[in-house]
Image (cartoon, helix red, strand yellow):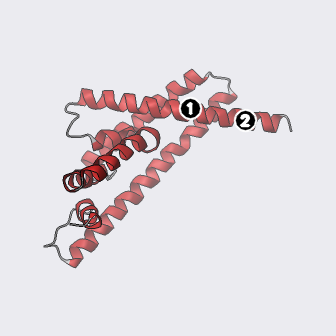
Amino acid sequence: MSIRRIILESFLNINKCNTCSKYLCNTITVLSKFTVYSLIDWIAAGFQPVIVTLLKLYHYSDIFIFGILWFYDISIGILFIFASKKVIEDLTLMAATRRTINLLYKEKQNIGFMLGAIIIIKCCIWDGAERFVIFFENELTGNARKLLTITIVSGIQMATWTKLYSFLYDACYSIFMNA
């Protein structure tokens, strides 16, 4: 089976027996979930530079700002995990991604392993802890492990973003105050 076919059929959760309308329905469902999740995620992420700017204006330390962003990110992540389990099944599309990676790994181990590694790195830096936790749903049994994982991954992500936002704020502040 070709890699494209594996990706398409597993991600859209379809098989050879499905009709054209099933393909279309599943495609629209995936696109809708992607749109809703992306919109909410970008709005939530958009508050982070606002929080940093406000806290920097009041001369809070980067450690304090990191703590606020970390708490905020953990809270948002928990809400997304809840929404993906209870409100809209697989809202973040990470269950579909995991299903695809598992099938790819069975067919082509190097490709499946490489894509899995890329997704893990991407979740730690960009996508967020909620997607990491949902991706490893089977391995993370129990809420305590999920909470610990979301705390660690969110900490890594927020340490990176706090440093970047703080640097950008300081750079802009020095440019505009010295102008």
Q: Quadrant of the N terminus?
A: bottom left
Relative horizontal placement of residue 105, taking residue 116 as reference (left or right):
left
**What kind of residue is marked 1?**
Thr
Q: Is residue 89 visible?
A: no
Amino acid type, callout 2: Ala
At 28% from the left and 73% from the top, the residue drawn is 24
The residue sitting at the left extreme is 17
Q: Position of residue 30 (x, y in %)?
A: 32, 62
* Residue matched to label 2: 171
View extreme (bottom): residue: 20
Identify the residue shown where x is 32% and y is 68%. 28
Q: Is residue 154 left or right of residue 144?
A: right
Using the numbered discs, state the Cα–Cα distance from disc 1 to disc 2 in whole angstroms.
Answer: 14 Å
* Contact, mark 1 vs mark 2 (Cβ under 8 Å): no
Q: Nearer the viewer, residue 82 or 22?
A: 22
Q: Quadrant of residue 176?
A: top right
Answer with the quarter of the image where residue 171 lies: top right
Residue bearing the label numbered 1:
162
- From this viewpoint, which residue is outermost toward the right? 179
Classify mark 1: helix, strand or loop: helix
Question: Height in image: 7 above or below 122?
Answer: below
What crowding class fits label 1: few (fewer than 14 Cα within 10 Å), some (14-19), or many (20 or more)?
many
The percent coordinates of residue 49 (x first, y second) are 59, 39
Residue drawn at (86%, 39%), measured in percent from left and top? 179
Residue 64 lies left or right of residue 128; in this view the side is: right
Q: Is disc 2 surrounded by few (<14), some (14 to 19) or many (20+) residues within 10 Å? A: few
Residue 128 position (above or below residue 107): above
Pick the front one: 75 or 110: 110
Say which element carries label 2.
Answer: helix
Which one is nearer the viewer's eye here, 79 or 7? 7
In this picture, residue 171 sits left or right of residue 97: right
